[in-house]
Amino acid sequence: MTANILAETEDLRVCYGRVEALHGLSIRIREGQIVTVVGANGAGKTTLLSALMGLLPHTGRIAFPRWPTAALSVEERIRAGLCLVPESRDLFGTMPVEDNLRLGGFSRRGDRGYSAGQSLEEVFALFPRLKERRRQTANTLSGGERQMLALGRALMAKPKLLMLDEPSLGLAPLVTKEIIAAVAGLRDHGVSILLIEQNARAALAVADHAYVMETGSIMLEGPAEAVARDPRVVDSYLGAR
Ligand code: ATP
């Protein structure tokens, strides 16, 4: 069954200078799913996202079977609906929440049927906290609110495949729960998601399919529930409750 594959890699290799960081990765992201990649620091998760975005030279294959051209530039990937929320969030700190959000819709301006105002209301419906704080500058938000803003800004571009790099980074467990629940809500609104997380427990609880990455290679993959029960994953990533 290949019809619903949104993105896939085959034997993907990325080098930084002479050091190979990804050693031939093959992954698939199906439409309507949350796919998670869990792994320790330095496993190569961010490198994978950057390569999918088209930001790094690589060998092997990266394909988006549902999108018009085979070899897409970064700009074409963004226009087709690929969106990356980096670990750093990359907000404009001195600008108000609403302006940060509106900038997220910039790549869609002029598209038929796109309304920035309507998208803004949809984001506010999903994250009422952002509406309350729409005039507050981004650098005065709490960590959780900043992550909501980064997610909201990404949603302004109407993504089809949203790639999230460590959305729980630096957040308290309760706030992490809130963010991960919001991510699950996005899937229910038809956005497919590639979720990179060190918080394996939170990611596996919400994902449909999971890959476990160790030093540039996939060491395990399968339905998220099965991966969460795998003794190697329990030992290395989940530990005692
Ligand atoms: P983390 O969870 O800590 O962000 P990660 O799984 O996202 O880790 P990457 O950031 O993809 O891992 O890094 C994978 C490997 O590639 C690491 O060994 C890292 O040191 C190396 N690396 C990443 N970026 C560069 C770079 N620009 N130049 C050289 N080496 C790099």
Image (cartoon, rainbow, N blue to C red):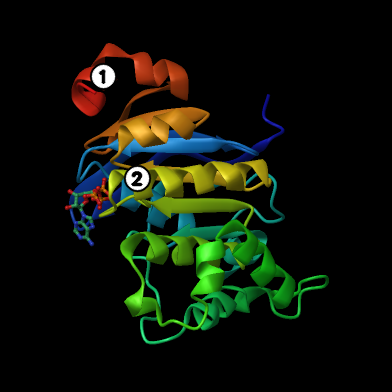
Does residue 203 lie above or below 77 as drawn? above
Q: Image quadrant of residue 218? A: top left
Q: Residue at x 64, y 53 (%)?
A: 160
Label 1 and label 2: CA atoms lie apart by 22 Å
| Tag 1: amino acid | Val
Does residue 85 lie above or below 25 as drawn? below
- Find residue 73 and report its horizontal and vertical position in percent: 55, 65
Q: Is mark 1 within 8 Å of ligand 1?
A: no
- Find residue 89 and report its horizontal and vertical position in percent: 37, 66
Left or right of 125: which side holds 183?
left
Pointer 1 or 2: first along the chain: 2
Q: Residue at x 28, y 41 (%)?
A: 198
Does residue 238 lie above or below 39 as drawn? above
Between 106 and 175, the one lying in front of the other is 175
Q: Is mark 2 within 8 Å of ligand 1?
A: no
The residue singled out by tag 1 in the image is 234
Task: State which quarter of the image contains the N terminus.
Answer: top right
- Find residue 37 and report its horizontal and vertical position in percent: 38, 37
| Tag 2: amino acid | Leu
Q: Are marks 1 and 2 in contact (CB under 8 Å)?
A: no
Mark 1 element type: helix
Q: Which mark is residue 174?
A: 2
